[in-house]
Amino acid sequence: METKEETAMDNRPTYNWVDITQEFVEASSDLQLGELLHDSTFGLFEAMSAIEMMDSKMDAGMLCNQIQRKVLNFSDSTESGQLKIKELSIPELIGVMDATMACMVTWLEGHSLAQTVFTNLYLHNPYVIEDRCLKAFSLCTLKIVDHIRDRVNRAGVFEEEDFQTMTYGFKMAGDVTDVRVTGMMKELEEDLHRTLKTTRSKQGEERDAETEKEHFLTSTLFSRVKFHRLFYAMLLSFSKEKCEGIPQSQKIVVQLQELIPTIRDTLPVGVQPEQKELSKNDYPTIMGFEPLVNQRLLPPTFPRYTIIKSREAALEYMETLLNRLMVVTTVPQMTSLHTVLDTFKDFSKTSPCVLSRSILQLTLLPPNKRVFGVNSIVDFLKETIRGFIAPPALSPKSSLFNNPQAKTYVDAWFMQAVRPICTLIQTTGHNRARQRDKWGHLLEDLSALQEEADKVDAYLHQQLVKTEPNRQHLACLGNWVLYHTLQAMISYLLSGFELELYAPYEYHYIFWYLYEMLYSWLINTLHRADNFLLEHETIADNQQKGRNNKKNKKKKRTKTLNKEITMAQAEQHMFGGYYKAVLGLRLDGKLVYPSFEFDSEEVQYSHRFLPFTTVSTPPYIHYAQYKEMSDLKRYEPEASAQSLYTASCKCFHQAKALLESMSTANEEIQTLIKVAKTNFVVMKLLMGGHKKDSNEPPDFDFSQHKVYPVMKLM
Amino acid sequence: MAGEEPDSENSEGKKKLERWLNKGMKIQMTDGRTLIGVFLCTDRDRNVILGSCEEYLRSPDSGKKEDPRILGLAMIPGYHIVSIHVDEDRAPGQSVM
């Protein structure tokens, strides 16, 4: 037996180790095959979650995953002289700056700080750096990282694949103020600017090569120092209260955009890592970077390899980020939730990075939970609803407006609406893949809100007819919620196309649900709202002008939902076209339902529409109902492939006409027109018997639009 | 759970193992690493599960201080175990951490 008393120098526990190897072997051989010896509190479930040592996939510390070379930390490498903390050459400084930016961008794409930004040893202890430029830059980088982390955390629109929040206990220069860091960078910039002035070519004076080179290098460094200072300043002004910093941010974004080409052209100036092959988690770096310095900090999960982006790619990322942030600066001019939601959805379609998504969310709803930091969410919603459906209860001219009981109910309902609406906004901020799930969950909240809205509407209606018997309040607030419910359902189904979840043999019920159910409900909802708007305006006009002034009767309506209605109709016809085309193709034997042993269409159908079961309006259509409603025998005479192609053709034509009638022809609408046109032609071809004998399924090509495919005959 | 039938005739070996449960344990592996954690579970093939496990690249006895890597719950396959030590002075149920 061996006993060894360890003296704990720090707070580590002292052990009294006793060798039991032999005893243990003997004792364990007493167990039965498959028998586990454990405490009552420890079960198979816990046992399952243990990581297996010596398994090359799970065990990050295994010899094959270990690095044979010596990994030096900051103090080791400064002591050994491998890390310069003073008198760095400009190419070295530029190398460090560009590599740091690459690390930061890699972090922003979902990798851990330990494997990205903090592979830069200088950031471990910037205070001992003697080089003024490097010190200021390091502190500025830490500040930027800390700020980004805070913003992304607050916005809460990230998932584990988007962003790693762990800081591993690194210090983020918390004891240095923003002003101090900005000041340090500014000073540096001014000094460099002075050098630039003295070294620049003057008229009638020949510069020697030395000065010329110095000038070039200084300007290269200058642009980077300026970029980082401005980048930090931009982040700070985006986070100013009440969106006060937005005009400033806008200016800075432009300045940053101007700096990008200069930096890109001078990327080769910075020192580059040597080209050499290392192992899978080790890679060549320049001085100041050690990919494995934090290896011990990583969580005990399977090893994750982080590939740092190239410096070019990092700059490209920055460029895209800046372009997106430019969009963000336009948001505070919006007055209605619906415009905001449209903008947010469009923003999301470009799959923006987590930082731009977070800044967008926080611009609309900063931590004080007021819209743009100023208005209460309830007021914002009231304004939106007035613009959408003009509820009598929110019109100062109505008797309801001053009815205290009615007011209490309305206000209480609005308070209730805040949370689901915030979730709705937040949903648009998540990454594309996660949004689908979020839309599904949101339906529960919206459904509950709708029920409440119906109750409030019923009460308001009862009160309203007492004084104004010609007006009504039924399905008014409720109609607004229904509009959002339908939008959420549509978003849910459409995201399935973008995420490539549906197989072509499933298309018929997806298209059917969109065409026959969701879009026709949506159009009804919009019509209803539009009627309310019209009624409201008529009443307002009558009250204003009295009965003697009938000249302006034909005056143009100020508020109308015509645009929304036309768009919804166009989309409905698109899906109608697809639906009928798919049915025709099925009859023609071009789209065959594969036979599955353990699956059926009913199961697939129920799975696809599962989240819709929680919604009461519109009611969920069960598979049996769908079969009945979509039965071709209902048509007189019974539909043939030919007649279906003709019907589909008409739908696409109609969609095209509607889209072309829209006054705002943005890129999206242009694409849709193109898709509708192509599909129209394809249907014409099918009608004409083109490729009649081919049993090849058609190709649904999503390359033009993520949701609306172009059909191609094979 | 497989093989969990109440075996009333608790053998000598089983009693011994039960006595070690929840005690600190130090296991050396074939690749030279040392793991220290709480003994939670084992089976006939000496596969051992340690809780709150820490990994040391060198033996802690070698004198050189090194920062351990925190592993949490870890399972060490029996055939990779070189030696097992138990921390004897501790009252059962007390964690090492």
Image (cartoon, coloured by chain):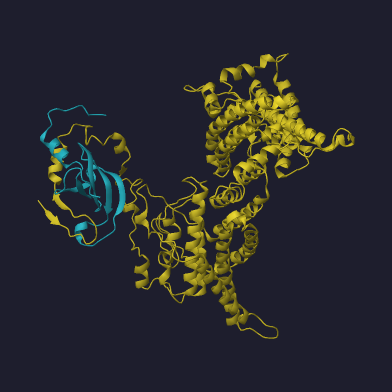
Chain colours: A yellow, B cyan
Residue A586 at what x, y percent from top left? 64, 23
Seen from the viewer's position, the closer of residues B88 and A143 is A143
Q: Which residue sits at x=59%, y=64%? A: A264
Residue A490 against residue A89 in the figure, above or below: above
Seen from the viewer's position, the closer of residues A458 and A680 is A458
Quadrant of the image occupied by residue A616:
top right
Residue A38 at what x, y percent from top left? 22, 36
Residue B14 at what x, y percent from top left? 14, 35
Residue A37 at what x, y percent from top left? 20, 35
The count of marks equals 0
Residue A696 visible in the picture: no
Quadrant of the image occupied by residue A27:
top left
Residue A613 against residue A188 in the figure, above or below: above
Q: Which residue sits at x=20%, y=27%? A: B5
Residue A123 against residue A369 in the figure, above or below: below
Seen from the viewer's position, the closer of residues A304 and A479 is A479
Report the side of A74 relative to A564 (left or right).
Answer: left
Residue A325 visible in the picture: yes
Report the side of A642 relative to A120 (left or right).
Answer: right
Can you name the residue that lies furthest to the bottom here? A205
Q: Quadrant of the N terminus of chain B?
A: top left
Quadrant of the image occupied by residue A657:
top right
Seen from the viewer's position, the closer of residues A102 and A621 is A621
